[in-house]
Amino acid sequence: MARRLTGFTPSGNLHLGNYLGALRPIIEGTGDTVVFISDLHALTLDHDPADVRDRTLEFATLLLAAGLDPDACLFMVQSHVPEHTELHYLLECATGYGEAQRMIQFKEKSRRQQQVRMSLLTYPILMAADILLYDTDEVPVGDDQSQHVELARDIAIRFNGRYGDTFTVPRAVNPPVAARVMDLSSPTEKMSKSTSSAAGALRLLDEPDAVRRKVMRAVTDTGTTVTYDPAGSPGVANLLDILAGCTGARPDDLAAGFDRYGELKKAVADAVVDTLTPIQDRYRKLAAQPDHVRDVLRAGAARARAAAGATVDRAKAAIGLLPA
Ligand code: AQP
């Protein structure tokens, strides 16, 4: 069975895109999955230490509240498994400087920073370590991250070719287009933890009133008829995609049921509230037991270390390090 890996970076608030595009497919899937909170990746941009720490626990709690079964997958916090950083260094020794510099995300994010952290340049190599540590076959990512999976693939092929068969070669798998939730205020951009405004992202912990307000103000267009046309009418298509994501119906079938944008928005708001309310109820109960969540994470890290340690040992031996 193909092994899949997904990381959630604790920078900003988890949103409906993270849930419909990444989390729910894991919860509903039957596959062999590695899920982790990628806290080390949250350090690549200017960050508040207390915020990263609090969000790491919040994200773990929310993932469990959303229905993630920690016994059915490997579930841990990245920094609790030191093999991630250990393999990162070994992979840096198999990566060219030019390769890292070519990453589009580096170019885009470094342009927005006054002082660029070295880790912003090297984090795709840490991401390669995240992927290769667990013999991952498939990494579900949107277009913005597929270049990083390609890099992990290139590094694995190069390392295997130079030092002998060590890593499983991963591949990016794209979620279906409808699984990409777009920003409510600028529907040609994806809903994002770091770049969406408060009005553009539906946060998993948004109260029902906030959800309704944001959906009712979502950007549509000047037309009046409800049709599913992602290129011509991306705002309306995004609302139909969200409704489809929450209800299981097809967006083009749903379009036929609405005469006006207002009716569609009301249905979307109701569906999102219905989706989020049970998650929020479970979240409140679990958040009252942080020790339980920490125990789950400790157990997950112990299991992850067993798997990751074997890969690091393999890589160290292959690259020429003397066993201790
Ligand atoms: N808008 C989205 N629609 C569908 N899936 C999405 N994902 C993210 N945004 C959407 C998926 O959620 C998982 C975790 O994402 P991440 O924490 O690695 O961050 P990201 O991919 O970079 O997404 P964000 O929300 O835009 O974060 P920031 O703003 O911090 O860069 C991934 O599987 C991702 O595909």
Image (tube, rainbow, N blue to C red):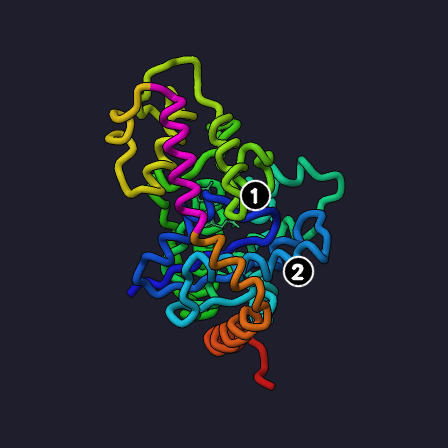
Q: Quadrant of the N terminus?
A: bottom left
Question: Residue 48's spot in the image, x, y percent?
Answer: 72, 52
State the residue in front, 89 or 131.
131
- Amino acid identity at mark 1: Lys
- In the rendered structure, the answer to whether residue 319 lies left or right of residue 114 reads left
Work out how far the residue at label 1 is from the one at label 2, CA to CA, in angstroms: 16 Å
Measuring from the top left, give residue 7's x and y in whole percent: 50, 56
Label 1 near ligand 1 (CB < 8 Å): yes
45 to 52, vertically: above or below? above
Q: Residue pushed farthest right?
A: 115
Residue type indicated by callout 2: Arg
Q: Residue 85, located in which quarter of the rendered image? A: bottom right
Label 2 sits on a secondary structure element that is helix
**Residue 90 in view in this figure:** no
Q: What crowding class fits label 1: few (fewer than 14 Cα within 10 Å), some (14-19), or many (20 or more)?
A: many
Along the viewing direction, whichever of 7 and 198 lies nearer the viewer: 198
Q: Label 1: which residue?
A: 193
Q: Which residues are magenta?
A: 260-277
Q: Which residue is mark 2?
A: 53
Q: Quadrant of residue 138?
A: bottom left
Residue closest to the eye, 54 or 319 = 54
Q: Mark 1 or mark 2, which has the lower sequence index?
A: 2
Q: Is residue 264 magenta?
A: yes
